[in-house]
Amino acid sequence: MSVGEFQLIQEYFAKELSAFGVNLGIGDDCALLTVPEGRQLAVSMDTLVGGVHFPKNADPELIAERAVRVCVSDLAAMGAEPLWFTLGLTMPSSESNWLSGFSRGLFKAASEYNISLVGGDTTSGPLAITLQVHGSVLPDKALQRCNARVGDVIFVTGNLGDGAAALAVIKKEFEVGKSAFAYLMSRYYTPKARIREGQLLTKIGHAAIDVSDGLLADLGHICKASGVAAVIEAERLPISDPVKKLCDPDTAMTWALTGGDDYELCFTIPPSRLRVFEDLQAKYNFDCTAIGEIVSGDGVSCLSEGRVVLPPKSAGYEHF
Ligand code: ADP
Ligand code: MG
């Protein structure tokens, strides 16, 4: 069944809010919001296009969950606390089944991150989803890309390469058993935005980025912005068991270095704060791995047994 524009906004997106700082939510020309006192607003936007960022026929609940998580991941990478988001939804038709699944996934992920939908725009056209997220961060505490310094240790949270492996499985390039399939699909459709880790890092970390385009590309952004280089060790890359079982070690390494879609945080810690960081890791069960070091120069190199390894496709995904 198809539904009209105003009815669909009402039915699927306008939820009663008791969220922080929302003086006026969905329904007027603008939302009215109050930024927490003494904090800066952190704003980020992501667009997910059907057929480019996710399969067009994917479950709408998962599409929405993924959209929220991917966008909130940028707040995590800045060390910001989620507050509000807006949604630009373009879709070929207004099918009530699709919309109710989409709305369910949207609010499920939003409630997990305590972020409230405060407005948006709905149009017809090829399926595309744009989210703008708003968060707050203490002035001077945001984890900017330009803050890496020579001598910093480079860490990543969780595992790398799962996103690329999942995509290869979705495209039927690889076959996996039931439990590996479930693991990879959850890593692809419901990645965990590392909000808590990002906020802990504002106390002691230097630079951070979320790995959306591939570690080499994203760590490269930190290096460029900071005027430094990075050396990482292939043997230290955290790769999940399902990925290790799925393919040969070279493919796993290539996925971990260039695959993207992992939404883990890559961050740097100065040597003077490593002790404090270790305490933090233990106290908060902070899942991360040291993979290398910031050095002088430019670019990112990956060493394996002392030799430079460059994966076949060494850049991350670029649209143009
Ligand atoms: P306008 O014509 O002033 O742009 P709209 O008719 O586009 O207003 O939207 C009406 C209200 O519904 C606004 O408050 C807008 O923020 C909200 N809205 C529209 N589409 C969405 C959506 N997909 N998700 C959340 N809110 C939406
Ligand atoms: Mg509008």
Image (tube, rainbow, N blue to C red):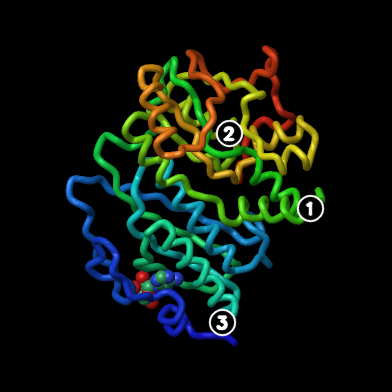
Q: Residues within 10 Å of mark 3 (few under 14, many from 20)?
A: some
Residue 146 can be seen, yes or no: no
Residue carrying label 1: 177
Q: Secondary structure at mark 2?
A: helix
> Is residue 133 toward the left or the right of residue 93 in the image?
left
x and y percent of residue 36 in the render? 21, 52
Q: Which residue is mark 3?
A: 96
Q: Residue at x 39, y 63 (%)?
A: 86
Looking at the rendered image, the quarter that the C terminus falls into is top right
Residue ID at (50%, 54%): 69
Asked where in the image residue 275 lies, by quadrant, the reply is: top left
As drawn, 175 above or below 108: above
Instruction: Place residue 112 in its image quadrant.
Output: bottom left
Residue 188 appears in the figure: yes
Residue 250 locus on image (x, y percent):
76, 30
Q: Which residue is mark 2?
A: 215
> Does residue 121 sit above or below 181 in this rendering?
below
- Name which residue type carries label 2: Leu
